[in-house]
Image (cartoon, rainbow, N blue to C red):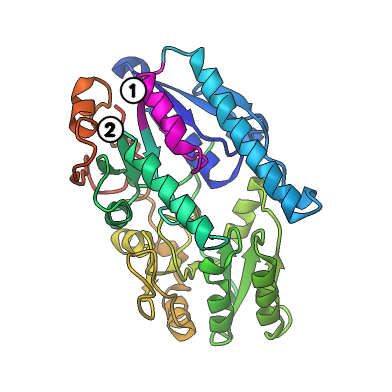
């Protein structure tokens, strides 16, 4: 069996997740021994930290120009349309010369191009798998944009042979999003990040009279930084480091205003992209990682970075976050103030008071994180599920595309250090 993994991202969470997954596959020696081989297709500017000799890498996709390099929003939008259209066509053309692949496994794809391109790939006899990292888009520009993205995503997901999510809650949310008409949905638990094929070394508790909280990652409204800044007023013994790139200027101005209301030195604001060489230091000098999401329909890579660096977590109960933290016993889960819409991705964020109480409970105990526990540490096994090749699966799903499908969970529910895969 020959698998092509498609991950255009040159850095960040998707690139790291793909590296973890394919490295785990190589280290588990299921390639030659089980007849499974995997290759990665990615962008030409793949970060140096993601290069490895463990599997073939094909950096054939054009790099994505940062939005700050465009003079106007109109030029940016036009450039993005051209880029994504060209990028996906390059991939399709490249696949034409590779008749040896059986399965294409997508970590991401342009939503409005996916339905047509997926149909083309199926006509070529390829089985399609998609890991659904974000069931609901992080932000929509307007109602028309929301309709087009959601409609395209539904068509694309329904055209796959299998869909992968990272928790039971996300499996249910994806089934609801697809209105019950979909291929099998498999739960493949997200693993703890590793470094160069080795687990990140557990860190000691941070000493000192004051405790430092960490908010890490891209800054956007649904991540709830404004809630955390208000909660910080109730935590006089704690300081906060905010490290990540803002994506919405108006929201970031609100964040700045809230930070300025606090005494000088309480908030360290690093408002830029954080290079991977800086990550260990940020987590190392923090006592607690806070994920105060107001809405979410996915799993957070930051949660798994916190586990890899032996840092406890306080999170709001949205997406797969609460489910994972409770199961692994690695922090506190703060209940939402109520539902703002249907599904686990649409709950209102926690109240500042509840968030501050969660921080007070767990902020003293980073040493409580045990990477040998379920969900976390040195178990190097893969959850490997049924094959996707052969006529039986195509009859099962595509022989009657209008019927409602059952949800499928294969393998142990407990998280292993590596993400599971469905194509072996």
* Viewer-side label of 1, 2: 2
Q: Residue 308: x percent and y percent?
A: 47, 51
**Secondary element at image label 2:** loop
The residue that label 1 is drawn on is: 30
**Secondary element at image label 1:** loop
The residue that label 2 is drawn on is: 384
Can you tell which quarter of the image residue 398 is in? Answer: top left
> Magenta segment, which residues?
101-128
Does residue 342 sit above or below 47 in this rendering? below
Q: Is residue 411 magenta?
A: no
Q: Residue 373: x percent and y percent?
A: 32, 52
The residue shown at (48%, 61%) is 311
The residue shown at (54%, 27%) is 41
In what quadrant of the picture does the N terminus appear?
top left
Query: CB atoms at circles 1 and 2 under 8 Å apart?
Result: yes
The outermost residue toward the right is: 71
């Amino acid at each position: 069996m020959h698998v092509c993994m498609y991950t255009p991202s040159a850095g960040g969470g998707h690139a790291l997740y793909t590296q973890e997954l394919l490295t785990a596959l190589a280290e588990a020696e299921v390639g030659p021994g089980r007849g499974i081989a995997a290759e990665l297709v990615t962008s030409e500017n793949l970060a140096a930290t993601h290069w490895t000799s463990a599997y073939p890498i094909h950096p054939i996709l054009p790099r994505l120009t940062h939005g700050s390099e465009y003079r106007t929003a109109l030029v940016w939008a036009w450039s993005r349309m051209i880029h994504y259209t060209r990028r996906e066509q390059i991939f399709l053309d490249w696949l034409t010369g590779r008749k040896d692949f059986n399965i294409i496994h997508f970590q991401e794809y342009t939503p409005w191009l996916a339905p047509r391109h997926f149909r083309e790939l199926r006509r070529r006899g390829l089985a399609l798998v998609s890991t659904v990292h974000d069931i609901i888009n992080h932000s929509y520009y307007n109602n028309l944009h929301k309709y087009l993205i959601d409609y395209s995503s539904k068509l694309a997901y329904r055209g796959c042979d299998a869909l992968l999510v990272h928790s039971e809650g996300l499996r249910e949310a994806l089934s609801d999003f697809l209105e019950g008409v979909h291929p099998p949905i498999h739960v493949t638990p997200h693993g703890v990040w590793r470094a160069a094929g080795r687990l990140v070394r557990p860190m000691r508790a941070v000493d000192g009279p004051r405790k430092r909280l960490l908010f890490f990652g891209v800054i956007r409204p649904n991540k709830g930084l404004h809630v955390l800044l208000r909660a910080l007023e109730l935590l006089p013994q704690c300081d906060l480091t905010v490290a990540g790139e803002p994506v919405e200027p108006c929201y970031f101005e609100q964040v700045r205003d809230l930070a300025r209301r606090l005494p000088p030195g309480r908030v360290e604001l690093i408002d830029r992209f954080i290079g991977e060489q800086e990550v260990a230091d940020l987590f190392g000098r923090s006592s607690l990682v806070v994920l105060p999401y107001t809405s979410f329909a996915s799993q957070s890579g930051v949660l798994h970075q916190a586990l890899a660096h032996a840092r406890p977590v306080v999170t709001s109960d949205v997406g797969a976050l609460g489910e994972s933290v409770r199961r692994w016993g690695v922090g506190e889960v703060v209940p939402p103030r109520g539902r703002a819409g249907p599904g686990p991705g649409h709950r209102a964020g926690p109240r500042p008071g509840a968030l501050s109480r969660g921080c007070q409970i767990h902020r003293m105990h980073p040493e409580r994180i045990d990477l040998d526990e379920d969900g976390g540490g040195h178990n190097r096994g893969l959850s490997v599920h049924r094959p996707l090749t052969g006529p039986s699966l195509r009859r099962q799903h595509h022989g009657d595309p209008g019927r409602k499908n059952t949800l499928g969970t294969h393998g142990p529910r407990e998280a292993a250090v590596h993400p599971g895969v469905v194509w072996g």
